[in-house]
Amino acid sequence: MSVTWYECKVKYAKFDEASGLRKLKTEPFLVDAVSYTEAEKRITEEMRPFLNEGEGMLITNIKVANFAEVHPFENADRWFKAKVSLIAFDEQSGKERKTNEYLLVQANDVKEAFENTVHAMKDTMGEYSIPAVAESPIVDVFPYFTGEEEHSERAEEFIRLKDSVPASYEENEAFALEDSLVAEEEE
């Protein structure tokens, strides 16, 4: 079954760390749903823990998001939209044909988002290129899981990866050298 992602813009009172006050913010969230009605219901349920008692929220917009896949990664706190061009050779016309799809990838910066996109595409049999990676305004992602036994491990893993906190932004020189050597061997 295909997953349909809905981008929901929600206006609510959010705690501002800089001022120490709660301020009205409008932020986009992503939910997995089968209809606009279910998306509205799900975002209302998912936002409830972020609201103080007696506070309300306003859903200002719901639209279908154009993400083919969503990939959470450990120790990342931002979401990036990666444009992936799948390259196919049309034998009848003798030309290359590109089909674009968008992935939502979790990372700490653009470079890491590019690397995470490559990692997400590692099992792809065909050729592809990644012409663009940009930070997405999406604050959080709420996938749908049925609660059945077979889905519980997948749900726990998705949530664990999504909610993990970056350990450090500093690059470990030993790991960086090892990564560069591995990259050179692969070429």
Image (cartoon, rainbow, N blue to C red):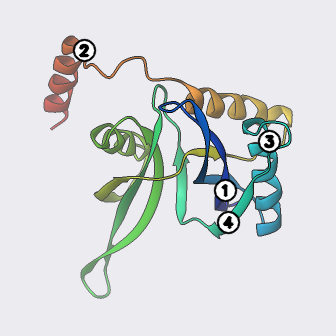
Rendered location of residue 151, percent (x, y): 77, 37
Q: Secondary structure at mark 4?
A: strand
Above or below, comparing residue 127 to residue 50 in the picture: below
Type of amino acid at the residue the image marks with label 3:
Arg
Q: Secondary structure at mark 2?
A: loop
First in residue order: circle 3 vs circle 2: 3
First in residue order: circle 4 vs circle 3: 3
Q: Secondary structure at mark 3?
A: helix
Marks 4 & 1, CB-CB < 8 Å contact = yes
Q: Residue at x 67, y 67 (%)?
A: 62
**Which label was assigned to residue 48?**
3
Label 4, on which residue? Answer: 60
Quarter of the figure with residue 129: bottom left
Rounded to the nearest angstrom, the CA distance separating label 1 from label 2 is 38 Å
Type of amino acid at the residue the image marks with label 1:
Val
Type of amino acid at the residue the image marks with label 4:
Thr
Q: Residue at x 54, y 53 (%)?
A: 69
**Which label was assigned to residue 160?**
none
Above or below, comparing residue 43 to residue 49 in the picture: below
First in residue order: circle 3 vs circle 1: 1
Rounded to the nearest angstrom, the CA distance separating label 2 from label 4 is 43 Å
Q: Is residue 159 left or right of residue 115?
A: right
Q: Is residue 122 left or right of residue 61?
A: left
Label 1, on which residue? Answer: 10
Type of amino acid at the residue the image marks with label 2:
Asn
Label 2, on which residue? Answer: 172
Q: Residue at x 76, y 40 (%)?
A: 51
Front residue (pair 187, 105): 105
Rounded to the nearest angstrom, the CA distance separating label 4 from label 1 is 6 Å
Front residue (pair 90, 176): 176
Front residue (pair 52, 65): 52
